[in-house]
Image (spheres, rainbow, N blue to C red):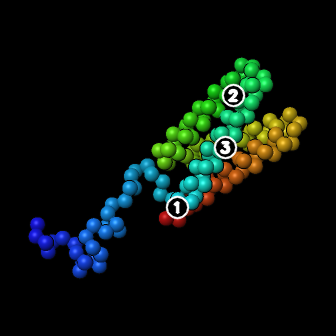
Amino acid sequence: MNTTDRPSDHDTGRPVGHAADRPTDRRPGRPAGPPTTWVLMCVLVVVNALTSTGFSVATVITDPSPAAWYALIRCLALLGLAGVLVALRSRLVPVLGWVLVAVQLLDGVVGFADGDPVKGVGPWILGVVTAVTVVLHGRSLSRR
């Protein structure tokens, strides 16, 4: 290959090896949305899983019944899955987000059924905020 076959300042207006000419770190399975919606969604998914896990730990401490332990194990599994999917920047994070939204909305129903409005409203707020971030991320992808 002779030197006239390579891109130069004359061909692109940039020096050879300029960052704009290099391939990006975009691999299959990586999110394509703007970083702000992706990061916000990931933070809310992890916060959602952490909140459920925290309440499950508190329940096991105050009432170590088998049902409380089962709930804790399931919350730990969701928290672990959230951590892995976020760390891998998986496209499955929104799916897990919707699962956690459903969990929070159902937790709110249980809270209201128990006669405690705080235990009903709190999970619903977290569920709605998580749903909003998942929807915003999805919309940012559809605009591309």
Displayed quadrant of residue 66:
top right
Q: Quadrant of the N terminus?
A: bottom left
**Dot placed on the residue nearer the N-terminal end, 3 or 1:** 1
Going by the picture, which residue comes out furthest to the left? 2
Left or right side of 119 for 13: left
Q: Residue 132: where, in percent of width, then height?
A: 67, 55
**Contact between labelled residues 2 and 3, with CB atoms less than 8 Å apart:** no
The label shown at residue 34 is 1
Identify the mark nearer the N-term, 1 or 2.
1
| Comes first in the chain, label 3 or label 2 | 3
SS at mark 2?
Answer: helix
Callout 3 environment at 10 Å: few (<14), some (14 to 19), or many (20+)? many
For residue 52, above or below residue 137: above
Q: Is residue 92 visible?
A: no
For badge 1, the amino acid type reads Pro
Callout 3: SS:
helix
